[in-house]
Every structure is written in C-alpha cells, then in structure tokens.
Image (cartoon, rainbow, N blue to C red):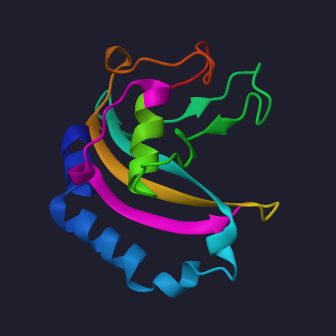
C-alpha cells in the first residue's frame, strides 16, 4: 500500500469518528477539582501529511523567550477574551505562531483541560487533521518559534 493511501486510511472519516468518540465519551476522566478558577490555555495537535507520511507538526520555542526556551511544543497559548475555549484559542494561537488557518471542521476531538505540573493553569489539547503540509504553507512567527529547528 502506498504511503499516501495509508495516511488517507488512518485519517479516514470513520477513524476520525472513532477517535472523537473515544476521547469525548468519558469526559469525567478529565475533570479536576477547582479547574474553573485556573488560567486556561490550549494547544493544537496538528496531524498532517508531510511528503506522503503521516506526521505531527510541532515547533521548537525560540531560545530568547522568557519561558520554555528551546522546548519542543505544539502551537498554542493562553486564552484571550473573545476566544471560544478551547478550540478558538488553539486555532487563533496556531494562526499567530505558524500562519496556518485551521477550520473548525478539521478538529477531530479535544482532550482536557488538565492542569499543568505547577497546578496554576489548565491546558486543553485540540486534535485536528490539517491535511498536506509543506514548508511554503507555513509562516513562522520568529518571536515564538526557532526558525532553524521548527518542523514536521
């Protein structure tokens, strides 16, 4: 089976529906006492095809940032006023960080929110199928990502 066919099979409508059902059936598994009072953030977990291979798109944070310097990350950040959390936050942050416009229809499921390790913020993961990606389809915000190392 050709790689592109395998990617299309893995990201088929029926497989996306199975994943979404699994991740949203037991929402109580993500409930954390007191989470409503915490700051909220969201990241996008972008599933894509890159050169015919199923991939995840990630960035490496700029080493000049005040926090999480040089760390591998998914695009995302803090909730802003007017965001429809968590999907709206993840979509907005992805557009700001890597110039990629995601449609709500591309979202497969959301996980969380769950507290960060310091228990001061809740973070949700928004899983989306963003299709075929190449270097020309992205515009890295160099204030956030490291232009020499970010990639698929």
Vertically, is 59 above or below 107? above
Q: Could you say which is closer to the camera, residue 85 or residue 99?
A: 85
Residue furthest toward the front? 81
Residue at the image point whose x is 17% and y is 61% from the top: 13
The x and y percentages for residue 19 are 34, 69
**Side of 101 relative to 82 (left or right):** left
Residue 116 visible somewhere in the drawing? yes
Vertically, is 70 above or below 68? above
The x and y percentages for residue 56 are 45, 41
Residue at the image point whose x is 49% and y is 66% from the top: 111
Q: Could you say which is closer to the camera, residue 87 or residue 29?
A: 87
Residue at the image point whose x is 48% and y is 37% from the top: 93
Residue at the image point whose x is 27% and y is 56% from the top: 10
> How many numbered marks appear?
0
Residue 56 visible somewhere in the drawing? no
The x and y percentages for residue 96 are 46, 28
Q: Magenta residues, as a range?
A: 96-116
Q: Is residue 32 magenta?
A: no
The x and y percentages for residue 141 are 52, 19
Vertically, is 134 above or below 56? above
**Side of 102 relative to 63 (left or right):** left
Q: Could you say which is closer to the camera, residue 120 or residue 6?
A: 120
């Amino acid at each position: 089976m050709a790689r592109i066919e395998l990617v299309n099979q893995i990201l088929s409508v029926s497989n996306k529906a199975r994943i979404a059902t699994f991740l949203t059936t037991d929402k109580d598994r993500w409930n954390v006492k007191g989470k409503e009072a915490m700051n909220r953030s969201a990241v996008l977990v972008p599933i894509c095809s890159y050169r015919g291979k199923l991939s995840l798109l990630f960035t490496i944070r700029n080493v000049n940032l005040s926090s999480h310097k040089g760390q591998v990350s998914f695009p995302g950040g803090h909730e802003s006023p007017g965001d429809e959390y968590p999907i709206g936050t993840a979509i907005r942050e992805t557009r700001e960080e890597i110039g990629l416009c995601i449609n709500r229809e591309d979202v497969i499921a959301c996980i969380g929110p769950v507290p960060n390790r310091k228990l001061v913020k809740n973070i949700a993961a928004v899983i989306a199928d963003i299709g075929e990606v190449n270097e020309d389809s992205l515009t890295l915000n160099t204030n956030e990502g490291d232009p020499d190392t970010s990639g698929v």
